[in-house]
Amino acid sequence: MNSLPYNLNDKNSIIKYAKQLVGKSLKDVCGKELFENQKNKGGFGQLLEKFYFLYEPNSDSEPDFKQVGLELKSSPIKRLKRLRYVSKERLVLNIINYVEVVNQEFNSSSFWKKNNNLLLVFYIYETGKEKVDYRIEIVDEWSFPEIDLEIIKKDWDVIRNKVKDGKAHELSEGDTLYLGACTKGSKGGNLRAQPNNNTKAKQRAYSLKQGYVNHIIATLIDGTKENYGKLIPSLAIAKTTSLEDIVISKFAKYYNKTIPNIEAELNLKLNPKAKNFYANLTKAILGIELKNEIEEFSKADIIVKTVRLNHDNLPKEHISFPAFKFEDIVEETWDNSSFKSILEHKFLFIFLKYDNEDLKLQKVKFWNMPYNDIKEVRKMWLKTKCVIKNGNIVKEIKFDKNGKERRLTNFPNKKFNHISHVRPHALNSKDTYKLPKIDKVTKDDVYTKHCFWLNDSYVKDYIFKD
């Protein structure tokens, strides 16, 4: 290879060279003639490696700059109004070798050897732009803070132990907090052999959760963020106690107490009609200032759901998710669908139970949907996509005795399976999204907003119940 424009044996030289990218595109720094005959083959990261750092992209187990132990990673970001930048997606790291990982320890693992010191290049993703025209906005070195690293070590252990148990095919990003195991490859992951089970598992890679990448971006731009409250105050506690145990122990002090009693003990008076009432109550119980976000929850993309139970432990209502866009669903596959992504998060369920008119804190539970249940939900999602794609949403229109219209749909209802269903999630019938195909019965090109729901009975029998 010709002489490089940086010193391979000097980390500072490599980082200084990398930072020359800030505010520029690959075309700006490499010249458009380098790309015209290449047809922009490969992703942004491969183009960055080949044309700027002048080495051939590879899948080596060693860091890209092995002489100084520095791994190069690039990732897209988006510009928002309130926050300067957020990650567009998780940060994918190296492939998990199922056969090898079961015999590794964290400190000598292929993951740690490759990723303990990262050189990050964040570029602004813009729809319709060529990859070589993306503006590079942030370039810097990243090493994991000590407390974060303790959580990542525990996450790595969860992944390894699940593979060791012959359950690589059941891996889910909801199993862990900061370090995930995301599918990698065509159509959600090529199949690979795993130890201790003849069932082949989708190829997966270690990845940093999107929330954690947002934390990295904020830290590199602004340093330590002031609007976050920590649940793990020290390295010593991070080494000996899990985040889940810390959270549960804080809530357990208030089990079987009414909300007014909890507020009184916390010297707090919240507006019960405010949309953020339960979010603020959660922060107060956890000892987080109401103006702050919970740092560990943000990094781990934890979804908090508050559930009110009747006397028989049945939720007062089904559990809703954000309304989906009909046009989006028909363009998705199950593996890249928004709903599957949501279900592979880790959840914190906060259960409140009615005692006459009062609500008492019953318990809290961390949960992520089991593999076999996600497979069942897939059937419901595919049915929903088919109904929308074929213009078959409305099955029949009926009118009550007052002449009010009632539409019966072909969407999968609660009887379709024991886990989830589809129903409206709108302000009123005029709160709509555009359809990709005109509905055959109504002849409309819009329809009332709908969303996916978890069945109340599923929440009672499979989440609330230990």
Image (tube, rainbow, N blue to C red):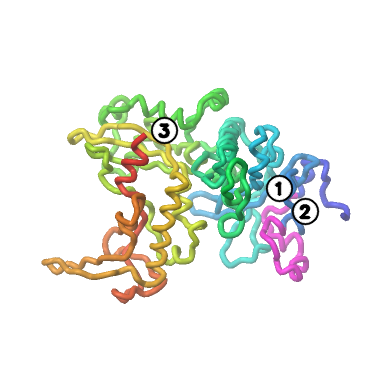
| Rendered residue at 30%/69% (across/down) | 394
Q: Secondary structure at mark 1?
A: strand
For badge 1, the amino acid type reads Leu
Q: Residue at x 48, y 51 (%)?
A: 341
The kind of secondary structure element at disc 3 is: loop
Q: Which mark is residue 289?
A: 3
Instruction: Answer whether residue 139 is visible to the viewer in this image.
Output: yes
Say above or below: 2 vs 179. Answer: below
Image marks 2 and 3: residues in contact by CB distance under 8 Å? no
Decide if residue 268 is on the left or right side of residue 5.
left
Q: Which residue is mark 1?
A: 72
- Above or below, 53 against 466 in this view is below
Residue span colored magenta: 18-47
Q: Earlier in the sequence, mark 3 or mark 1?
A: 1
Element type where label 2 sits in the image:
loop
Q: Nearer the viewer, mark 2 or mark 3?
A: 2
